Image: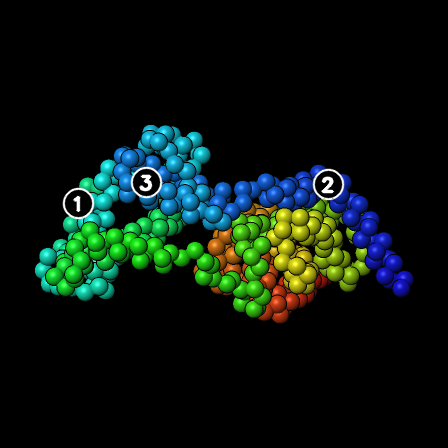
Amino acid sequence: MKHMKRAILWFLLLNKRFLKKPLLLFLLCLIPLSALLSLRLPAGSDLLRIGLSAEDPYDSLVTEVIDGLVKRQKNGVIRYIFYRSGDDMQSAVRKGDIQLGFLFPKDLSALLDAYAAVPKSGDGGALGLLGQALGVTQTNDVDLEAMKKNQICVICASNDIVTKLEKEQLFGNLYGVISDRVLKAWMDEHASGFTMNKEQRDAFLDQELAKEDISKNFFRLSYLSGVQIQDSRIDRYYLSPMRGLLAITLVLICFASCLFLSQDNRRGLFVWISPKKRALFHYLYLLVPVIDGGVFAYLALFLSGALEGPREFPAFLLYLFAVAGFSNLVRTVTGKINLFSATIPIVCMGCLFLTPVFFDIRIIPAVQGFLPPYFYLKSLHGQMSMAWLLLYAALTGAGSILLDSIRNH
């Protein structure tokens, strides 16, 4: 009991000292600020804004396509905005009001007809025609000149992943129109086998296909752990990077504390502590501000709605010890404060791009596994056992204390 009281007293004294550091206070203030900003983020279809315009806004097919895109955007990641002219849309891209814009040609029908054209040679089949519409058959079966002349123009400020994904999104929205034209083109090619004329066939197909319009949700989302994602949380996907960014912020807080520890050691503030206990004291010294930041980060996750509930707390708690162990290990290995300071931007960049903060990519697994956010973010939804995070926290903590103890002797 006496040791417990002494530990609590040391924690409070160190915590009081840390909270007088302007740098640490600044990093702590960034955490609730991120939660407040997340509450102001546009939800659902306001996240990405895409412009739509047409060289001939009175074209019936263009009007049908644009109306379909605008009306179908409910609860989607993309919000489509119609502009009366291409110049207005280009100006919106330049100002940053929209990420990119699509300018439809004067004759969209010519583009789709060229894309879904039936080869002049051979009877072909329905699957062959569909494959041709998807661009997998011989190029001489498609009217390339007509396609090139009537292409949809993409106006963008940068060629990034949003541009790539949105082009695929637009093609997916046009798929229904293209598939209808493939079917009608095939029926026109085999008109002798039908009793109806073209007008009757087209009207019949339009009527029947309209009955099959899909308006229900085909998907049920669940994590690898088996936990189903509730409908109320599905549209909170844009908050997913917040957890990773907060995890990196905790690493920054602990690295800043390592700088404070190095300054205190140079001043000889802890020379009275026994060399046998000094390594453990250094580890606990770094753990104090990490706990402060952890309290702020957990509250930020809760307030923003990104928290996965009570089941996230064990992983989050282990992560605090993992951060302290990792930071202490880097401090001990580098030794000198100048060399340690040089590792801060390297570690931050590594955490941003090598751990699943924005994208989960598998590259240089040995380096990825050395960074503390990796096991934490991977263990939340069953992609990786929490035992790996526990092992990582134990190894980095014990390793840093052992190496620090050797250096002290």
Give the residue at mark 2. 21
Marks 2 and 1: in contact by CB < 8 Å? no
| Element type at mark 1 | helix
Disc 3/disc 1 C-alpha distance (Å): 21 Å
Q: Nearer the viewer, mark 2 or mark 3?
A: 3
**Neighbourhood count class around disc 2 (C-alpha, 10 Å): few under 14, some 14–19, many 20 upward:** few
249 or 398, which lies in front? Answer: 249
Q: Quadrant of residue 91?
A: top left
Give the residue at mark 1. 146
**Left or right placement of residue 324 versus residue 142 in this view:** right
Residue type marked 2 = Lys
Question: Residue 122: where, in percent of width, then height?
Answer: 11, 63
Residue type marked 3 = Thr
Q: Residue at x 19, y 65 (%)?
A: 125
**Left or right placement of residue 230 versus residue 100 in this view:** right
**Left or right placement of residue 292 versus residue 50 in this view:** right
| Element type at mark 2 | loop
Give the residue at mark 3. 63
336 or 49, which lies in front? Answer: 49
- Residue 32 seen from this side: yes
Q: Could you tell me which quadrant the N terminus lies in?
A: bottom right
Question: Residue 347: where, in percent of width, then height?
Answer: 55, 52
